Image (spheres, grey):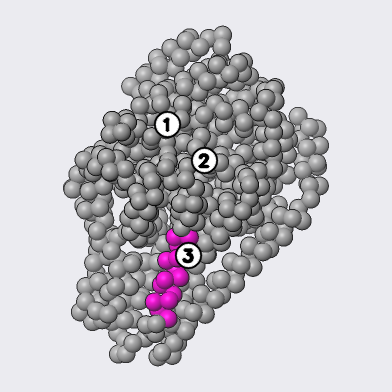
């Protein structure tokens, strides 16, 4: 194995990188030039009374927030250009996708279903649909299903053992299934997969990693294997994961916004990231030999902000795979790889805070020796995604204080409006790019319910995003305060089923957010009312977080959205085969309405 790895790594390192280097240089210059221009506009906006200490603080905070949405803007611009001008966007950014559909499957692939205290019937339904498709394709003997359980709830563990035991017997002789449960959740999901590697990894060429809520078409599974067979330089191949159709109000609005943002953003970023793409930890295929040899994760001890096993393991494994000389690629094609989105605002916040805590461990890896520059960028951007949140909240608070204490207008209103407009345009650029692409294609417009419904969904989703983003910024800021006080959160299983959020629960969760929104607005109302409209962009979400959490969990609201065709996605009216057995409420309601 070592000799094979050395030869393959040597081959990978002589791949010509010049075209990708030029793309990255162009992208870097565009991003830096745009940030410089926006910072200069911010200085001019704050210039009427001269640049004092409050202005310097505001400019510094604004600079911290810039990279995330400027990068998103240029990813969207590039992605839109590729979607509109290229005959095949996927082929353009991933040449390895060029293959013959009838290429024989010769490799051995392990399909890893990683679960922990999930409802086993839904996870079993997901995997049985895939098993049936593999058996029908005549390739079942090339796959081995591993159900890797870390469940420690006795009733769930017993149900798992019984349910997956039945599945094993039902498909005996066609597709092999192995159920294994660890008694201790050592290393979390990464430790679960490492345990598989130590036991069975040497028996297989590839591993397809799935979460309990993952669904993937068999056609895509076979395509991933064929790409990996034909491109030995690829170590990880990630699919573009989209949300399953949701019947909850929060889930519908959120999935629609993600659907708009993801495609143009991902195609654009894939164009310049090239062989240093992202890995999201699921719905992806790994080359097992280099993964076992090169992607072992350390246990963080002294000096780490969050000690212990690595929580957000995926991106670290991706940069280690690149360090070993293998490519990490993404297949930016939507419609065949799914996950469930959180059904309520509370569950979304809880999931995001788990990611926030895990990403804070990336500080430990930023200066690790041997990493590619683009890998360090990816780790830094993953950190900045959360670190910029306190900067946004500080902008609200410092800006409020500056407006309240200033004896004169400390901003130029004309330039201020221009700056706010540019920031909003950059912020929504990925959504706008995908919207323009959808509206220009009749088949896509029809899939989203027609142009009128689609535009209505786009506009109301923008309003929802203006509320949701500041809520998340406040959540991250409060989390950082607790983290600095030595308080971390437990890495628990998600609640994926639709449910109502009681007022008491929302109040307990979001009362600090409400204060973060209410106090600045009250100060401005008493001292500088002219500043309220701009402050509302940052304060309205936290101020309304409690009623928003409750209202978007009402079952009737979700049903009304389905009935109106609002936030419709193509899979509702024309569900793919892998979703039909799941009997999703959104699909059933859409079919009843007609």
Left or right of 234 on screen, residue 6: right
Query: Toward the viewer: 157 or 215?
Result: 215
Q: In front: mark 3 or mark 1?
A: 1
* Residue holding disc 2: 334
Measured from the top left, where is residue 14 in percent x and y? Answer: 81, 47
Q: In front: mark 2 or mark 1?
A: 1
Measured from the top left, where is residue 144 in percent x and y? Answer: 58, 20
- Look at the numbered disc 2 and give the secondary structure of its residue: loop
Magenta part, dominant SS: helix
* Residue holding disc 3: 426
- Separation (CA) of disc 3 from disc 2: 23 Å
Q: Residues within 10 Å of mark 2 (few under 14, many from 20)?
A: some
Q: Which mark is residue 345?
A: none
Query: Toward the viewer: 515 or 45?
Result: 45
Quadrant the C terminus occupies: top left
- In the figure, 515 relative to 439: above or below? below
Measured from the top left, where is residue 47 in percent x and y? Answer: 44, 87
Q: Residues within 10 Å of mark 1 (few under 14, many from 20)?
A: some
- In the figure, 402 relative to 567: above or below? below
Q: Is residue 423 magenta?
A: yes
Quadrant the N terminus occupies: top right
Residue 591 visible in the picture: yes
* Residue holding disc 1: 575
Marks 3 and 2, the one that precedes in the sequence: 2
Q: Is residue 174 magenta?
A: no
Residue at 55% from the left image edge and 50% from the top image edge: 266
Residue at 55% from the left image edge and 71% from the top image edge: 35
Residue at 33% from the left image edge and 22% from the top image edge: 155
Region in magenta: 415-430
């Amino acid at each position: 194995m070592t000799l094979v790895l050395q030869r393959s790594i040597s081959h990978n390192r002589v791949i010509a990188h010049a075209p990708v280097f030029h793309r990255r240089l162009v992208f870097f210059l565009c991003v830096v030039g745009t940030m410089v221009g926006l910072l200069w506009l911010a200085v001019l906006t704050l210039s009427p009374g001269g640049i004092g200490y409050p202005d310097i603080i505001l400019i510094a905070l604004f600079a911290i927030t810039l990279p995330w949405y400027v990068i998103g803007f240029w990813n969207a611009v590039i992605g839109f250009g590729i979607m509109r001008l290229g005959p095949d966007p996927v082929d353009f950014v991933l040449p390895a996708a060029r293959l013959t559909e009838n290429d024989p499957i010769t490799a051995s692939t392990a399909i890893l279903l990683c679960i922990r205290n999930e409802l086993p019937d839904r996870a079993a339904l997901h995997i049985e649909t895939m098993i049936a498709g593999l058996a029908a394709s005549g390739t079942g003997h090339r796959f081995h299903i591993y159900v890797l359980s870390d469940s420690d709830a006795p009733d769930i563990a017993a149900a798992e053992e019984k349910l997956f035991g039945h599945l094993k017997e039902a498909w005996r002789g066609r597709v092999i299934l192995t159920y294994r449960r660890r008694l201790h959740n050592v290393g979390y999901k990464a430790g679960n997969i490492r345990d598989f590697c130590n036991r069975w990894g040497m028996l297989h060429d590839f591993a397809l990693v799935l979460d309990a809520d993952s669904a993937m078409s068999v056609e895509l599974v076979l395509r991933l294997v064929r790409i990996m067979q034909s491109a030995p330089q690829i170590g990880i191949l990630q699919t573009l994961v989209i949300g399953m159709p949701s019947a909850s109000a929060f889930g519908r609005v959120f999935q629609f916004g993600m659907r708009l943002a993801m495609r143009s953003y991902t195609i654009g970023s894939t164009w310049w990231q090239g062989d240093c793409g992202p890995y999201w930890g699921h719905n992806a295929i790994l080359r097992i030999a280099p993964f076992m040899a090169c992607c072992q994760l350390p246990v963080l001890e002294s000096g780490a902000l969050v000690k212990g096993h690595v929580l957000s393991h995926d991106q670290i494994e991706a940069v280690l795979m690149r360090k070993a000389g293998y490519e990490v690629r993404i297949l930016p094609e939507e419609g065949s790889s799914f996950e469930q989105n959180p059904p309520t605002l509370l569950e979304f916040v809880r999931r995001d805070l788990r990611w926030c805590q895990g990403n804070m461990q990336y500080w430990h890896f930023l200066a690790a020796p041997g990493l590619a520059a683009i890998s360090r960028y990816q780790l830094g951007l993953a950190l900045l995604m959360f670190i910029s949140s306190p900067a946004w909240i500080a902008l609200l608070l410092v800006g409020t204080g500056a407006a309240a204490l200033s004896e004169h207008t400390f901003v130029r209103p004309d330039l201020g409006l221009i700056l706010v407009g540019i920031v909003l345009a950059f912020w929504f650029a990925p959504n706008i790019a995908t919207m323009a692409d959808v509206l220009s294609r009749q088949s896509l417009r029809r899939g989203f319910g027609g142009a009128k419904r689609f535009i209505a969904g786009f506009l109301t989703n923008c309003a929802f995003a203006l509320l949701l983003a500041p809520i998340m910024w406040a959540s991250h800021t409060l989390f950082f305060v607790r983290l600095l006080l030595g308080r971390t959160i437990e890495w628990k299983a998600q609640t994926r089923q639709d449910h109502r959020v009681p007022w008491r629960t929302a109040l307990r969760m979001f009362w600090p957010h409400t204060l973060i929104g209410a106090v600045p607005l009250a100060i401005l109302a008493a001292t500088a009312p002219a500043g309220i409209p701009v402050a509302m962009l940052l304060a309205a979400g936290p101020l309304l977080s409690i009623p928003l959490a409750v209202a978007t969990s009402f079952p009737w609201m979700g049903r009304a959205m389905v009935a109106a065709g609002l936030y419709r996605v193509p899979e509702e009216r024309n569900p793919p085969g892998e979703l039909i057995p799941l009997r999703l409420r959104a699909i059933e309601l859409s079919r009843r309405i007609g």
